[in-house]
Image: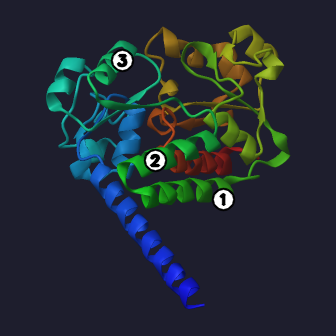
Amino acid sequence: MLHRSVSCRAALVLMSCLASFAAGAQVQTRPARVASLNLCTDQLLLALADRSQISSLSRLAADASLSFLAHEAAGLSRNDGGAEALLSAKPDLVLTGTYGRQEQVALLRRQGLEVLTFGPWTSLEDGREQIRALARRLGHPERGEDLIAHIDKSLEQARGSVPGRRSILVYERGGWVIGPRSLLGEILVQMGFRPHQETLGLTQGGVARLEAIVMAPPDFMLVDEASSRAVDNGTALFAHRALAEAVPQERRLALPGRLTICGGPSTPAAIDALSAEVRAKVR
């Protein structure tokens, strides 16, 4: 019995030492200088990192028309995404998206820099995984869980809020329609909307012809708040007389682009704003 007791105490001491070592290793490996090359990774970095950890953000980080956390980015350094400047800055970690700058990313990795890439969210679960992965790498897992809880709370409050399975079409610049696997599409379905893409024959997304929408209009349309002004060819469609008759303004739900461009800290705000539009316009 004595031998077994000593063995147990020794095992507990060893486990305690290993746990202490692991905790120390986590502190030592927490990146002290993190650079972001992408608008969406800017948002995640600003939400999850200590301000002192941020080495630089992309040039779009402080653009209030695109960046949800533009006010948080004020006073922080910017980068132009160039490999030479980043190598000179010597960040511990570089964050970027999956589109563009792949040659720079390859060069940075060859030079020994750690680069993490994050694609556009294809679902809420994809977003949760990204948040958790980055929060852990930054050394702040609790902040990731807090952000996820914030998103889930907004989603729960909005779930089932649309009566009668009304159809909705997410209509973007140039007539672009989102595909079925998208963050915004999933949110709309959970709220109770029925996607209108299939009615138009766009099961994978794509460009919707104006004639097709006029012939088979959705109950509602979700558009960018800025689409109320036709300033170029990309926004001229929104002001077309035929579309205005098929889907008038009172059946158009509008959100600021900065809420929907990226998944992340803007997501609960986007859900809340969309819920307010539903309360105001969906009967």
Kind of residue at badge 3: Ala
Residue 170 location (% of width, % of height)? 65, 28
**Residue 177 shown left or right of residue 72 in the figure:** right
**Residue 114 shown left or right of residue 181 in the figure:** left
**Nearer-N-terminus badge (1/2):** 1
Distance between the Cα atoms at labels 1 and 2? 17 Å
Kind of residue at badge 2: Pro
Q: Is residue 269 above or below residue 214?
A: below
**At numbered mark 2, what does the secondary structure look like: helix, strand or loop?**
loop
Location of mark 3 (residue): 106
Residue 35 location (% of width, % of height)? 28, 35
**At numbered mark 1, what does the secondary structure look like: helix, strand or loop?**
helix
For the point 39% across and 56% down, the residue is 140
Distance between the Cα atoms at labels 3 and 1? 43 Å
Location of mark 2 (residue): 265
**Which of the two residues, 38 or 1, is positioned nearer the viewer here?**
1
Residue 115 location (% of width, % of height)? 36, 30
Residue 68: tell me if it is visible. no
Query: Which quadrant does the N terminus fall into?
Result: bottom right
Residue 197: tell me if it is visible. yes
Instruction: State the count of labels.
Output: 3
Q: How dense is the environment of label 1, judged by Cα within 10 Å: few (below 14), some, or many (20 and up)?
A: few
Residue 205 location (% of width, % of height)? 69, 18
**Nearer-N-terminus badge (2/3):** 3
Q: Is residue 216 above or below residue 126?
A: above
> In the drawing, what numbered circle is on residue 157?
1
Outermost residue, left side:
88
Kind of residue at badge 1: Gln
